[in-house]
Image (cartoon, coloured by chain):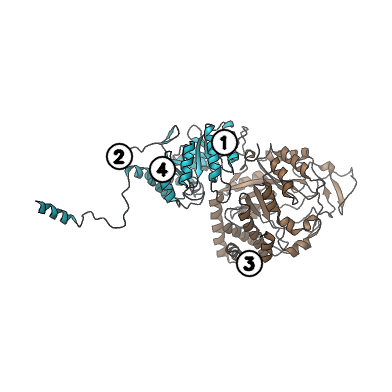
Amino acid sequence: MSFATILDQLPPAKSPLLRRFASLLEPNDDASFERMAQEARELTRQNFGRTMRMFAPLYLSNECINNCRYCGFSRDNPILRVTLTVEQVVAEARHLAAQGFRQVLLVAGEHPKFVNGSYLVDCIRALRPYFSSIALELGPMESAEYAPLVEAGAEGLVVYQETYDRGSYARMHTSGPKQDFNWRLDCPERAYAAGFRRIGIGALFGLSAWRPEALALAAHLEYLLKRCWRSDLTVSLPRLRPAAGDFVPPFSLGERELGQLICAFRICFSQVGIVLSTREPAPLRDVLASLGVTIMSSGSHTEPGGYTGQGRHAVHQTVRGRILPPDAGIDALATGQFEISDERSPAEVANVLRRRGFEPVWKDWDQALITR
Amino acid sequence: MSDKPSKLKIADREFTSRLLVGTGKFASNELMRDALDASGTELVTVALRRADLSGHSDPFANILDFIDPKRYLLLPNTSGARNADEAVRLARLAVTAGLPSWIKLEIHPDPRYLLPDPVETLAAATILVKEGFTVLPYINADPVLAKRLQDVGTATVMPLGSPIGSNRGIETRAQIEIIIEQATVPVVVDAGLGAPSQAAEALEMGADAVLVNTAIAIASDPVRMAHAFRKAVEAGRDAREIGLAEARTTASATSPLTAFFSEETAAQKL
C-alpha cells in the first residue's frame, strides 16, 4: 500500500503508535507537559547521548520555476537571483569548513535549466575535500537522477512535503511541477531506492492546522521506518518565517506547542533524529535543544553567496519569471529564501551548547564509508 | 584461590582490566577522558566516523587527542558501516591513518536498533583476519555465528546483551551461556548493559569481559559511574573465579533434618 492511500485514510485509521502520538498532541496542563519533557529528554540522552550534531545549509541557487505562496524564491517574486558557479560554491564551502562544519546541506530552488544533474555532481565532487557529509535539498527527482548524486558522494536527501493537507497544498502551490502532491509524497522512497543513507522529511508549520499536519507527518515517518529500514530518517518541524512575497501564514504553531510537538516525536520515535534550523529564535532554540533536538544548524544564510558574498556581480532580476537583461549597476547579494531568527555565529552556538551540557559534534560521518 | 584475578588475554595481549569502554555520547571530551581514567580500562573503542582520518589534525574532529595511546589500546570501530565492503574500507583507512590494526567490527544496517548484520559481519571478518587485523566482532547472541567467526580467526566474539544504548541488561542470557560454553576465544558481552550489577552478572556468567558506553556516558556523573562499573566488573570476575554457590528453589538447612537417620543407620551397622 502506498503512503498516499494511508494518508487519505487518516485520521480515523490510526496505528497504536499514532494513537499515542495524537494523544500526546492534545492540549495539556503544565505538569503533563513537564512530564513529557522529562521523558523526551531522557530518551534523547539514551539514544543520542549528551551530544548535538552540527550542520550548515549552503544555498547554490534561488532560481525556481514553481510558485509557492509562502516561499521567497517563488517564480513570480521580483527578487534578485543567482546560481553560484562551482568555484563560488567552493569559496562558500571553505568559509563553512573553517567555521568547523563537516556536515553541509546543499539547497537549491527547482529550476532544471540552472540546477541540473551534472551541475550537482560537479558541486558534490568539488565539496568532498571539505565535508565528511553532504546532503541535498532540491526539487524531487527520479531515482535514476538521484543515483549519480549518491555516486558522487551525497549521502543525505531532505524533502519536506510542506503540507500533508491536499486542499492546503493545492492552494499554496499555484503553478509549476511542485503542484503534483503525490510525486513529492513518494520522493523519500525514490531517494531510498537510489541509495541515500540519510533521508529527512518534514512539514512547514503554518500552512494548515498543526495537529493533523503533525499526525500526517508522523504517519509518513512510521511508514518510511518500515520500508526504508536501512536509511537514517530525520524529521524537521520548521515554522513559517517572513519571506519575499509577504505571505501571511493562515495557521500558527506556538512556541509551547512546538515544544510539545518535539516531545511527542521523541517519545513515539525515540531513535529518529530531530532537526532544528535557525528559523527559530535563539532563546527558544536553547530550550528545545534539551527536549529532543539532535541536529542543529547555526550561523545560516538562506541566500546563495550569503556567507562570502559570492555571485554578487552575477545576480539578475526576474519579473514574473522573466529574466531581465543584466544590469551592470546591480551589486548586491541574491535574495534569501526566508529570514533567519537565530543570528549567532556557529562558535557562539557551540559555546552555549557546551554550557548546557552538550558536546557539539561536527564530524559524525566519513566519506570513506560511501566512496572509494 | 590466588589473591590476584587472572588476566584477560585477547590475541597476543594481556589486560588486567576486563572492562572495555566506548567513547560516544559523552557531554565533552574532557569528561570522557576522566571517565576512562576512572574505569581502569585498558581497551577503548572509538567510532572511526567521528575521528579525523585525514592526518590533518582536524580541531573539529579531535576525539583521539583525548585518548592517551600509551595508556590505552585504541580499538577503532566501524560503526556506520552497513555492509562488509564499507567496514573493510574503514578498517584499512584506520591503519593508513596510523591507528592500531585491532578493529571492533560493527556492521548494523538498521540505524534505529543498530542490530548487527550476521552475513556481512562474517564476510568482513573473513577478509580482515586474512589481512592481518585483530578482529573483535559485534554480533547478536547467536552461538552458531560465534562459532563461525571463531573458525575464521576472530580474536573474540562480542555478543549483545540487548540493543545498543537500551540499558536493558542481559536479555539474551540463554544464548550467551551457550556461546560461553562453546567459545575458544574470549567472550565480551557488548551493548545493553545499563547498570554495574548487569556487568557483574555477565562476568559471573563466565563472560571474559564486558564493553560499556551509554550507561557511563549519559550518567549524571560519568566519572563515578565509570568507577562503579570498574568495581562491578572486578567483583563479578572474582566471584566467577571463586565459584558461586548454586541457586536452589528450597531452603538448605545448615543442620540437616535427616542427620539422625544416617547416624541411626551407622549405629545399626555396628
Q: Chain of mark 3?
A: A
Q: Are marks 3 and 4 in contact (CB under 8 Å)?
A: no
Q: Chain of mark 4?
A: B
Number of labelled discs? 4
Q: Is residue A106 visible?
A: no
In this picture, residue B162 sits left or right of residue A137: left
Residue with the mark numbered 3: A13
Question: Which quadrant is the N terminus of chain A positioned in?
Answer: bottom right
Residue with the mark numbered 2: B1
Pair 1/2: label in front: 1
Tell me the amino acid under the disc marked 3.
Ala
Tell me the amino acid under the disc marked 1.
Ala
- How crowded pointer 3 is (Cα within 10 Å; few <14, some 14-19, many 20+) is rated as few
Q: Colour of chain B?
A: cyan
Pair 3/4: label in front: 4
Q: Nearer the viewer, residue B104 or A60?
A: B104
Q: Are marks 3 and 2 on the same chain?
A: no
Q: Colour of chain A?
A: brown
